[in-house]
């Protein structure tokens, strides 16, 4: 396509500008220029295809959407890694059977937590939260979802991603908590309906349905209307279900304890999505964290306390229910 054809010239131009900028204080400028040029060319491709065939435009857009170019996560300070409470805290376990890369942190005797990252990211984004949980005695699994990070394999839909996650991460012993951030919260909810075993669930700044996630993506990226309609139609055919029902149905059908957390200043996934998730169940209300956005909510000082309180509260309620029986 246009971007691929122009890539050699863009690389040559970027290399030349990098050599000039190397003597200055902004060596990253050529990289930013290259990304800007790439975004413009890709947008131009979609605009041209939209006028010719919205179906072809939708096919290309979905293909790019699921390539999931991971953004660089915030690096962990070296002292946090070297002073971890257990040797080999950041040990990575590569499970070859399903090509899913899973990082395991913390004590094997602690309560088991599964952390699921969102779109345009990989498991590294969740590592600061994972280490904080591990330091409090939890055993934490942090996978790279299929098609991201070190996990391989083609991706056709979030439903397919959830199916692979459920197949890989389900075991005889259910997780104590599954925590999903952003699209990872929606993927976790879908995975519950496909056999993922857990005793409780936490969503953090998650969209309420697959329909809402795709609608937010199309609006924020400014896609043409005809292409947007074709994307929704094509994606629903791929998933085999109404996109508006993927998420709410799983939320209604599961009887697991659910904690819904959202960043109050989230502009990527609006806070109203948390209320929509809770609408699928009676007596469920969201918790909004102040002074944070879609990304920084993972480092909010109250987040760990909320997860621990939720775990202990639901554990006590489960013990009381068992006693009544």
Image (spheres, rainbow, N blue to C red):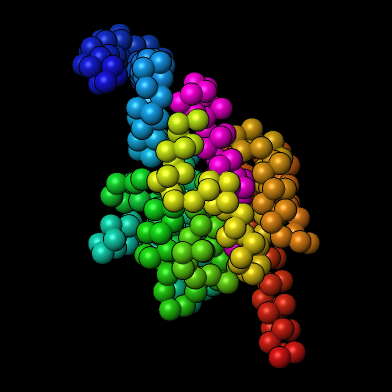
Which residues lie in the magenta part?
201-228
Residue 83 in the figure: left or right of residue 322: left
Q: Is residue 59 at all visible to an observer of this figure?
A: yes
Q: Position of residue 162 (x, y in %)?
A: 44, 56
Give yes or no for residue 210 being in the magenta stretch: yes
Q: Nearer the viewer, residue 34 or 258?
A: 258
State the residue lying farthest toward the right: 283
Q: Position of residue 9 (x, y in %)?
A: 23, 12
Give yes or no for residue 242 being in the magenta stretch: no
- Rendering quarter of residue 291: top right
With respect to residue 237, does 69 lie above or below? Answer: above
Q: Position of residue 34 (x, y in %)?
A: 35, 17
Q: Quadrant of the C terminus?
A: bottom right
Q: Nearer the viewer, residue 243 or 15?
A: 243
Residue 217 in the figure: left or right of residue 148: right
In percent of the image, x 76 and y 61: which residue is there?
A: 282
Residue 321 in the figure: left or right of residue 205: right
Q: Nearer the viewer, residue 268 or 102?
A: 268
In percent of the image, x 29 and y 46: which residue is there?
A: 154
In percent of the image, x 36 and y 17: which residue is there?
A: 52
Q: Nearer the viewer, residue 147 or 227?
A: 227
Residue 218 in the figure: left or right of residue 40: right
Q: Quadrant of the N terminus?
A: top left
In percent of the image, x 56 and y 34: which residue is there?
A: 215
With respect to residue 14, does 281 lie above or below? Answer: below
Q: Position of residue 212 (x, y in %)?
A: 59, 40
């Amino acid at each position: 396509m246009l971007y691929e054809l122009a890539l050699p010239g863009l690389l040559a131009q970027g290399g030349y500008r990098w050599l000039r900028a190397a003597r200055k204080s902004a060596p990253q400028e050529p990289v930013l220029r290259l990304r800007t040029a790439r975004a413009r060319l890709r947008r131009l491709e979609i605009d041209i295809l939209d006028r010719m065939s919205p179906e072809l435009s939708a096919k290309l857009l979905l293909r790019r959407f699921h390539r999931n170019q991971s953004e660089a996560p915030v690096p962990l300070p070296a002292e946090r890694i070297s002073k971890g409470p257990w040797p080999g805290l950041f040990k990575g376990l590569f499970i070859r059977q399903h090509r899913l890369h899973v990082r395991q942190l913390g004590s094997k005797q602690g309560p088991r937590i599964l952390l699921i990252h969102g779109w345009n990211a990989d498991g590294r984004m969740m590592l600061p939260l994972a280490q904080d949980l591990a330091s409090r005695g939890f055993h934490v699994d942090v996978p790279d979802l299929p098609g991201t990070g070190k996990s391989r394999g083609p991706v056709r839909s979030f439903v397919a991603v959830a199916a692979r996650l459920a197949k890989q991460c389900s075991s005889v012993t259910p997780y104590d908590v599954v925590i999903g951030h952003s699209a990872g919260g929606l993927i976790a909810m879908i995975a519950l309906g496909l056999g993922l075993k857990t005793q409780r669930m936490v969503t953090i700044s998650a969209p309420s349905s697959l329909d809402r996630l795709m609608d937010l993506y199309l609006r924020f990226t400014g896609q043409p209307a005809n292409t947007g309609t074709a994307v929704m139609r094509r994606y629903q055919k791929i998933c085999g279900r109404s996109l508006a029902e993927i998420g709410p149905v799983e939320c209604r059908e599961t009887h697991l304890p659910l904690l819904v957390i959202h960043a109050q200043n989230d502009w990527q996934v609006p806070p109203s999505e948390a209320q929509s998730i809770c609408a699928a169940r009676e007596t469920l209300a969201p918790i909004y964290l102040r002074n944070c956005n879609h990304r920084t909510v993972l480092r909010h000082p109250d987040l760990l306390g909320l997860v621990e309180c939720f775990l202990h509260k639901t554990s006590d309620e489960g013990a009381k229910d068992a006693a009544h029986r």
